[in-house]
Amino acid sequence: MDGIWLDFERPLLELEKKIEELKATSHNGIGPELDRLTREAEKLKKKIFSNLNRWQRVQLARHPQRPYSMDIIERIAEDFIELHGDRYFRGDPAIIAGIGIIGPHRIAIVAQQKGRTTKERIYRNFGQPHPEGYRKALRIMKLGAKFGLPVLSLVDTPGAYPGVGAEERGQAEAIARNLKEMAVLPVPIVIVVLGEGGSGGALAIAVGDRIYMLEYAIYSVISPEGCASILWRDSSKAPEAAEALKLTAEDLLHFGVIDDIIKEPEGGAHRDWDATAARIKTKVIEAFDELKRLPIDELIQKRVEKFRQMTPKSD
Amino acid sequence: MFFRRGKKPKEKPEAKIIIPDGLWLKCESCGEILYKKELERNLWTCAKCNFHFRIPARRYIALLLDEGKLDEFPLALKTRNVLGFPRYSEKLKEAQQKSKLEEGVIAGRARLGGETVVFVATDFGFMGGSMGSVVGEMVAHSIRHARKEEIPLVILTASGGGARMQEGIFSLMQMAKTSAELALLAQASIPYITVLTHPTMAGVMASFASLGDIIIAEPGALLGFTGPRVIEQTIGQKLPPGFQRSEFLLEHGLIDMVVHRRDLRSTLIRILKILMIKK
């Protein structure tokens, strides 16, 4: 397997490489050895992935080979028509938006999009939206509401872009506006955090009726690096900060902030995009099935109530 | 790195909290030496350069509301260190002692030019006026109160810290919580005015502070999403003077007006008189 891998994945990769090499020789009598190595690899995979600390999960959430929003959309939507522009300033490639079909549901989709190659990364601004990106997302969500299309929102961003133009055009206003409008949007909204849920920049498309996270996704008020540099004036202490912030899917489920975790294939979503997408699809269709049965008033009331309850429970 | 311990982080002059206690004070902006009595008469604004000193929430109550009185809502929750975040419990205690506040927000009912209003103020002196669960809950409660009682809402912000890091994801969710309540308030056509003071940033600016029907700012306040230092690091350039200040936001169409502290009260009264629909 080519590409960049994380340190804690390496022992597993080396073993897998050995297996591949052995297979390539295809001598007679390698069967038992192959079986042994395969079993060993499975065991090692289990061992590594059942003991991940929070920082390792942060790294998985940012894995360069992790499926990004478009990879998921391509796999879960029978049709997807991308739509562009906020109608005021510019099209923002850090957010993709459009209409499509997923299973029995016609839906609107908004998502943050990272790039895989250097060129793409720059084009997508590393998945960091400008205000016009959030305004585009809102436009498409409202388009959805107008035609009774529920909204699927895929979250994967380090955060809203911290730049001069973003401030000049009202980054804060764009985010606040989305929070307010999404709270009462008269169609079901389902959120899936795919990778990084970076603070307000993530939340700006993450107010909805169901909030799911992939198993190794993270969602946090501040990046571990940012937190570490405020706390200890040293961003290299990000691993400690990740522990303090409690930002994993498990943490957030425990806090009652998210509704469920979507399990990733063994070894992480980057090892099997198809299987990851299939699980997301099942979960999302189920959620829309349920939510579409609710009268709109009740749907909105429950959504507002959901966020009212986002307060630490006394234990 | 042990040797770095004793080194105090560099602070910009305007980031300091001013508690006037001597007879004379130096203006943080122009350096003019100001007589404290005179400064007080000028509502803690510099007579020479118009710099607005930061003042605590209680002073705004005295300054803006009829008879300087606020019938306060009690805090519904007690702040806890739910995440077991390093040093948060100590920081809270420190903030409480220093600010003489239980939390970074004061809210309640008051009269403003004879009109009953719900008034909320965040206080920079309490952990930078940052929003954790207790602040978020109080803001949400105040919005609900305004909606149910059909009285206008005025929120004054001094929140440089945005969402309070030490409460993790719960702080972030307060942005959604307060904005959701504001959506319902808007549907009920209840006027909502925000007064932004120095500084109002990040999670607070990206939620209830930016959602006023009318947004007023004090002169020279730092207002925005990302702090200027982080932007400078990102773009690798110095930012121009005046960037993210009230006047800059006015120029870019992000706020309605910049109003001197001495005119805040009368401006609020004039606006409410026009917006308030008598039932």
Image (cartoon, rainbow, N blue to C red):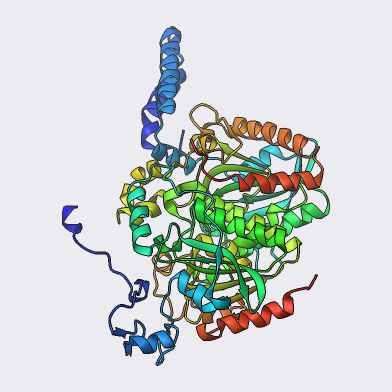
Q: Residue at x 39, y 52 (%)?
A: A227
Residue A93 appears in the rendering: no
- The residue furthest bottom is B48
Residue B73 appears in the rendering: yes
- The residue furthest left is B3
x and y, in percent, of residue B21 in the image: 30, 77
x and y, in percent, of residue B91 in the image: 34, 54
Q: Is residue A265 left or right of residue A210?
A: left
Q: Is residue A314 left or right of residue A154?
A: left
Q: Is residue B94 left or right of residue B79?
A: left
Q: Residue at x 17, y 53 (%)?
A: B2
Task: Determine whether A308 is above or below B28 in the image.
Answer: above
x and y, in percent, of residue B207 in the image: 58, 61
x and y, in percent, of residue A170 in the image: 58, 69
Task: Determine whether B37 is above or below A22 in the image.
Answer: below
Q: Nearer the viewer, residue A57 or B115?
A: B115
Q: Nearer the viewer, residue B265 or A294?
A: B265
**Residue A263 falls in image quadrant:** top right
